[in-house]
Image: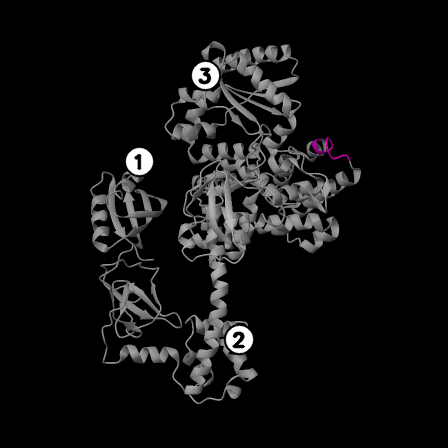
Amino acid sequence: MRKDKPNITFDELYDKISTYITNESDRKTIKEAYLFAKEKHFGQKRHTGEDYITHPLNVAYILSEINADYQTISAALLHDTIEDCNVTKEELEKKFGSEIASLVSGVTKINKLNITTDSDATLANHRKILVGLTEDVRVIIIKLADRLHNMRTLWILSEKSQKENCKETLEILVPIAHRLGMNQIKSELEDLSLRYSKPDVYFSIVEKLNQSKLERDSNVELMKKNLTELLNSHGIKHKIKGRAKSIYSIYKKLDNGKRFSDIYDLNALRVFVDTEQDCYQAIGIIHSKYRPIPKRFKDYIAMPKENGYQSLHTTVFGENGQLYEVQVRTYDMDRVAEHGIASHWSYKEKGKTIMQSAMEEKLQFFRSIIELSNEEENDEMFVNSVKEDVLKNMIYVFTPKGDVIELPLGSTPIDFAYRVHSKVGDSMVGAIVNGNIVPLDYKLNDNDIVKINTNKSSFPSREWINMAYTSQAKNKIKSFFNKIDKEENLKKGEELLNKELRKKKISSIDFFKDENIEKILDELHIDELADLYIGIGSNKYSPISIINIINTEEKSREEILLDKVNSTSKVNINVKNDIIVEGIDEIKVNIASCCRPVPGDRIIGYITKGNGITVHRSVCPNVSELEERLIDVRWNDEIDKNYSTNILVHTLDNKNILIDIIAKTASSDIIVQSVNTVNSMDGYIFEMVLSVPNKEKLNKFINSLEMLENIIKVERIIK
């Protein structure tokens, strides 16, 4: 990747794309896209003070370095015109065609990537990014290039904005680049993120590398010379390059407890040969002279990584007693290793590019995203699912035919079955791993060979939801039973409503007039009568509340509830729910998100309109001055689960203090669900979401924190 010159001219871009885009018409389109973008961005400036057109030019140049097709280069030049220049997709379509316009539109959808402390905005942006992947893989490749250029000029932003950009880059975009196999872009994004998020660590590693550079370069050159002579003597055509270890990868190893002197792949060489056969011959020749370290040999040619990466890896005792990591691969393998899916730009195959076909066939990552985006009900559930199923540590297991299936660490045969196909999961009756029958909650390991036994007449068990690990499998199982439940609830709801009509002596013919049905559906914001029956059958609506929508002389559901609550003859009912509502048997109860009460807190209930009762802490200002709609509630004495609540921890500094805070949870039955850091004039503030069993243990935890050095105070908060 080009890092030495921040501003690219169009002439430089044109010279670069001319080396591989030979069609005159395609090059003309790129030039027209540049002139159009330059005109539309005229007068606009970047934060750096440069003309805005320098940004799309640099993005296009980054893409030209991975030989992007002319549509992608054109879209890169135009990628901000819809968002920043009031250009319409239709205008671009008319001038540049539907394919380029579609790419620009796709980038526009995921282009507002500003992280804020507003979790809803953050989640929505993440959803846009990830769902954007499913439209055309080139959209996210443009986005990665866009982010890379912005990271190269991150110095212009405030420290807070720098850290927010780095956090999102590392959590969302780097894993995507990894899944796409785009190692060059991934490595530079990681290094830049480390440079701005932890500059002291970054420059410490750079200094150590510089101190040992002369000796390391000398060793690598000597090893390179000797390997060249060795391979030449055996007639192996090849090239050898020294491989620079990325600063971020060194940081990760140091962070895992290794010493700098223990990172033996700092001396690294990459050998390029013509054929796969040459790879194995070369590695054998190298091992015949240089003793390999046991368990450090990896064959990614016979068993490629899911993102298409292929290479042979070994670590050997080389010249001067130094350890050297040596990678051997063909030139084609290297192209894929550096650019991943972006190495397949050309050639149409049944109407799709090879790149698009490769995405659909090989990267289960994308299929997971497509399925999750369709099945999850809201942004938070979707993003949590993506983080759990897609962006975490993965294992690679095999079907009996040798096909590789990628799953998150912790997956079971149930997850495997549903990853293969929904029908396989739904009809599964057992699993065999490495030739042995295993229970369905068995944790799969790397390289397991998994066979799923099926029976067409079988169906899932509801218990599988707790045994499955991935959200994809859980959602598939839920979907199976939701379909069955819908059919049962539809029939049940219709019977209940008709029974209530007969009880009220209301004519079904009169009640189900078109205008009445339309009024009910409109009132409940649902689309059809079947949804109404399903809602009644699942106890979402009561039959009397539906009748009262039409028969307005009857009391409304809310009035009935208020009457029941305010009646003098209240009865204490022993219910199994965590919150006991005095005088009411069955009602929906919610915990208020503003004050987040936990067992042991004094609480009060507030009767909402159409959403049951919301339980607040008695001291919550949102209800403390209200008199109407309040109801007595109390905690059940038999509660055995945790509740979430918020605290603020004010500290003098943040050096290692967070480690001390979290260490205090180890013996307290308290779990830290999330932490946000806020800089203040006096130090740092940590906003923490805790999962706690009760108020007593929460107070003990708060008291233990206040005993720590450098902690000013700890308080619960009400939003």
- Asked if labels 3 and 2 touch by Cβ distance under 8 angstroms, the answer is no
What label does residue 529 carry, if any? 2
Mark 1: which amino acid? Asn
Q: Quadrant of residue 252?
A: top left
Question: Label for residue 656?
Answer: 1
Q: Is residue 373 left or right of residue 561?
A: right
Looking at the rendered structure, the secondary structure element under dot 1 is loop
Compared with residue 523, is residue 178 higher up or lower down, i.e. above or below? Answer: above
Q: Measured along the vertical axis of the image, is residue 228 above or below residue 587?
A: above
Q: Give the camera-side residue of 598 and 427.
A: 427
* Residue at 53% over, 87% down: 509
Residue range in magenta is 16-22
Residue lying at 26% horizontally and 51% vertically, measured from the top left: 715
| Mark nearer the N terminus (2 vs 3) | 3
Q: Is residue 111 visible?
A: no
Kindly identify which numbered label has been placed on residue 212.
3
Q: Residue at x 71, y 38 (%)?
A: 346
Label 2: how many Cα within 10 Å (few below 14, some 14–19, many 20+): some
Instruction: State yes or no: discs 2 and 1 in contact (Cβ < 8 Å).
Output: no
